[in-house]
Structures are given as structure tokens and as C-alpha cells.
């Protein structure tokens, strides 16, 4: 099993920034890719960004140029730097890992006010 603990969500005005963190523990060997998804009220969960153990990250078109995903393998932690936030970025953000199994964090709320 892999346990994921997210932090860094909150309320911010449009144009502002937030940084999310997700620390993994447990059976770390199971993790290949790490990433972030989000789910807004009444909408399906969608990909925000993913990053492999080594290699280039992948972003949703809606966040390209504004969000940056990074990963510290020594700390088993993935980050999401979010800049130029828009009200439509408001959602619960979930940390995700893939590899030998798929695991999810509990989610952290990000609210962007206009």
C-alpha cells in the first residue's frame, strides 16, 4: 500500500499562486508516475499534470504555462506550483500515483475567487 498526504490548498484571489505538496509513504517501490487530478463540483475528475520517475511531465492544456509539476524522489514528494490562478481552477485537487497499483490522496480544496 501507498499512503499519500496532501497539503497546500486554500483560498486565493484570481491571479494569485498556490503550491500543493503530496508526500508518499509505505510501499514506495510501487510508484512509477506521480501526478495531480482535480474535480470541480458537478464535474468529472480530470488530469492536471503527471510526472514520471524520470522524464518529462505532462500537462492538461488548460494549465499549460501556468502550473508546474515537480518531484523530489529522495523525499517521495510531488509538488504542483500553480500561478495565474483562475476561478475555473477551483476544485478539489487529488494526488495520484501509478505503477504497481493506483493510489489516491484524500484531496485538498483550492478555491480561486474572482
Image (cartoon, helix red, strand yellow):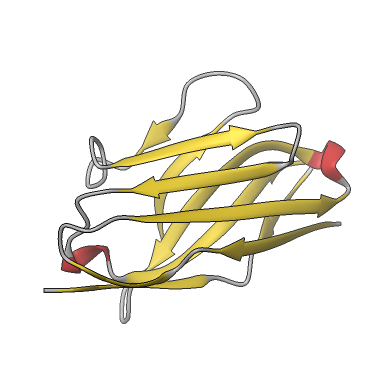
Count of marks placed on residues: 0
Q: Residue drawn at (47%, 21%), measured in percent from left and top? A: 56
Name which quarter of the figure residue 44 lies in: bottom left
Work out which residue is located at the far bottom of the displayed protein and give it.
Answer: 42
On the image, the x and y values in percent for residue 113 come to 18, 75
Q: Is residue 65 visible?
A: yes
On the image, the x and y values in percent for residue 15 come to 16, 57
Q: Residue drawn at (65%, 27%), measured in percent from left and top? A: 53
The front one of 46 and 94 is: 94
Left or right of 32, for residue 38: left
Q: Is residue 45 visible?
A: no
On the image, the x and y values in percent for residue 55 come to 55, 18
The front one of 27 and 84 is: 84
Q: Residue drawn at (41%, 51%), measured in percent from left and top? A: 47
Is residue 29 placed above or below 3 in the rendered structure?
above
Is residue 1 placed above or below 9 in the rendered structure?
above
Point out the image quarter for the N terminus: bottom right
Is residue 12 placed above or below 32 in the rendered structure?
below
Work out which residue is located at the far left of the displayed protein and give it.
Answer: 114
Q: Residue drawn at (70%, 57%), measured in percent from left and top? A: 103
On the image, the x and y values in percent for residue 64 come to 25, 37
Work out which residue is located at the far top of the displayed protein and give it.
Answer: 55
Name which quarter of the figure residue 14 lies in: bottom left
Point out the image quarter for the C terminus: bottom left
Amino acid at each position: 500500500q501507498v499512503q499519500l498526504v496532501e497539503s497546500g490548498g486554500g483560498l486565493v484571489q484570481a491571479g494569485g499562486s498556490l503550491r500543493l505538496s503530496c508526500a508518499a509513504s509505505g510501499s514506495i517501490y510501487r510508484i512509477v508516475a506521480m501526478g495531480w487530478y482535480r474535480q470541480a463540483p458537478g464535474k468529472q475528475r480530470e488530469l492536471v499534470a503527471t510526472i514520471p520517475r524520470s522524464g518529462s511531465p505532462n500537462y492538461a492544456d488548460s494549465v499549460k504555462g501556468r502550473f508546474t509539476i515537480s518531484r523530489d524522489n529522495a523525499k517521495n514528494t510531488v509538488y504542483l506550483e500553480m500561478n495565474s490562478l483562475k476561478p475555473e481552477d477551483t476544485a478539489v485537487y487529488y494526488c495520484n500515483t501509478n505503477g504497481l497499483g493506483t493510489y489516491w490522496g484524500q484531496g485538498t480544496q483550492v478555491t480561486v475567487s474572482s
